[in-house]
Image (tube, coloured by chain):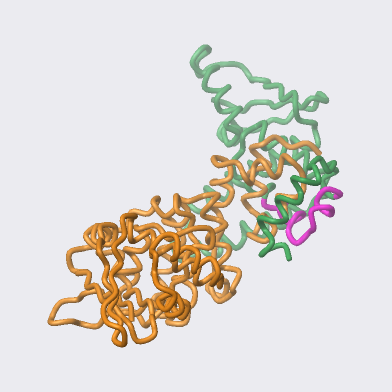
Chain colours: A green, B orange
Amino acid sequence: MPDIVLRSNDGADHKISASTARLSRTVASLLQDLEASKGEDAELLIVPIPNVCNCTLKKVLDFCEQQRAFDDLVRASPAAQQPEVTRKTQAWRETYMKVSTDELYHLVMAAHYLDVPGLLGLCTDAMADHIRGKSPSQVRACFGLKPNLSPEEEDDIRRSNLWALS
Amino acid sequence: MDLPDGPLTSILRHLPLESKIQAQAVCKTFRDILCNPSGGSGVWGSVRLEDPVFDAASTIALAGWLMQRAPGIWLLQYMPRMADMQRKQEILRNVIPKVAARLAPEAAFELDLTSASAEALFGNQEPAWLMPHRDGPLTPYWASLAGALTRLDLRFDQSFLTLDLPLDRGVPVVLEQLTNLRGLTMRDTKRGPMHLDRSLDPFLDMQHLAGLMFMGKPAKIKHALQTRYEWTPEALEILLLARIRLQEEAQMQGSRRTSMLWC
């Protein structure tokens, strides 16, 4: 299949190769259905992504492009060079994940909706860093959550985890 | 910030153990994911124990606590790691028996160690201590593993009773023998033999008593003995000195055997 266009919910188009787009299982499933119904000679396909804004979609596609490039590089590299490829991948991902909490939230939602496992794992790991070492009240503040456990429930949690929480 | 369960579970899965425990108190959604038997197993399944953790006293509490949430983890992750560390005698002596003793009874039955693996895990080790489960007796299964490890030694001043349990026929045999003991005899070198003719499951009774002893409740011990065994006051006083000690059994007449001593 030739290149396809993913259209964000604010109308921005992103042209990418079908093989890259298939890193999103949601898109891959859609493409599979279309291939079955239209065949390989279909026109340039425009796929609307209603839940993702332009900025976030661009970020997701950056990941997919890089992921595919790294996958190709791993396949093409001899075994001796694999550690170097891995190191480069990790360095790129560290830079990629330098985003605000708000951006990270939108990225998680997009990765979940588009079903990109690699990106979802990366984002949730980064989000876990926002929780790590924080008290429950700090986590609530970070995520904008309201305390909705009753005093009895909180007591119960505290009692059964006394050894760890004290 | 409202995240679907899938990503939220993934986030929680990435957390280290301490943060997971803390996170239960964040909100209902976090708590439900972390405590839900199905979702919780996945979340806690990612817990990794590094060597230094095994040196911490909290590890002992952790194992029992974790087992109640995700029993399968024990078999899949903890056991192999502990087996890897068999050479560390300090850990074997101080941590593994206590961890085993803290396992929830239902969780213990999740384990399906063969005799060979039990021996590989517990065999040929230095003396170790076994404490009864805080909230109840050890299960026969775990006691059978304990038997595979060492011997149960209940010390009654100068009185003793020895039961030999053959290990070479495997854990199931040991288990069977432990659960079918009847008519135990305690030999008192000063006062002559005393017989314990018990209609209840003697193994569970022993564990019940052992638990009371370790919890340091002599009044309850006395009550239990008076109501369940009708022992004499002298015997009660002797029993208050009791303790449980697990020891490795040396080679005995060319084949390994496990002894359970009351002495």
- Which residue is pictured at 31% across the width and 69% down the height? B147
**Residue A15, quarter of the rendered image:** top right
Left/right of residue B74 with respect to residue A29 in the rendered view:
left
Name of the residue lying farthest toward the top:
A37
Quadrant of the image occupied by residue A27: top right
Image x and y of residue B231, in percent:
39, 69
Say if A63 sits above or below B130 in the image. Answer: above
Q: Which residues are magenta?
A: A125-141
* B124 is within the stretch colored magenta: no
Where residue A157 sits in the image (x, y, percent)? Answer: 70, 51
Number of marks in picture:
0
At horizontal 58% and vertical 22% (from top left) the residue drawn is A30
Q: Where does the image place residue A124, in percent across and percent down from the top left?
A: 68, 47
Image position, residue A125 (x, y; %): 67, 52
Quadrant housing the C terminus of chain A: bottom right
In the drawing, does residue A58 fall left or right of residue B62?
right
Q: Residue at x 51, y 12 (%)?
A: A37
Which residue is nearer to you in this view: A10 or B125? B125
Question: Looking at the picture, does residue A141 appear above or below residue B230?
Answer: above
Q: Residue at x 31, y 79 (%)?
A: B248
Q: Is residue B75 above or below residue A28?
A: below
Q: Is residue A129 magenta?
A: yes
Front residue of A74 and B245: B245
Left or right of B224 in this view: B249 = left
Magenta stretch mostly in which secondary structure? helix
Q: Which quarter of the figure is the N terminus of chain A placed in?
A: top right
Asked whether B184 or B23 is in front, the reply is: B184
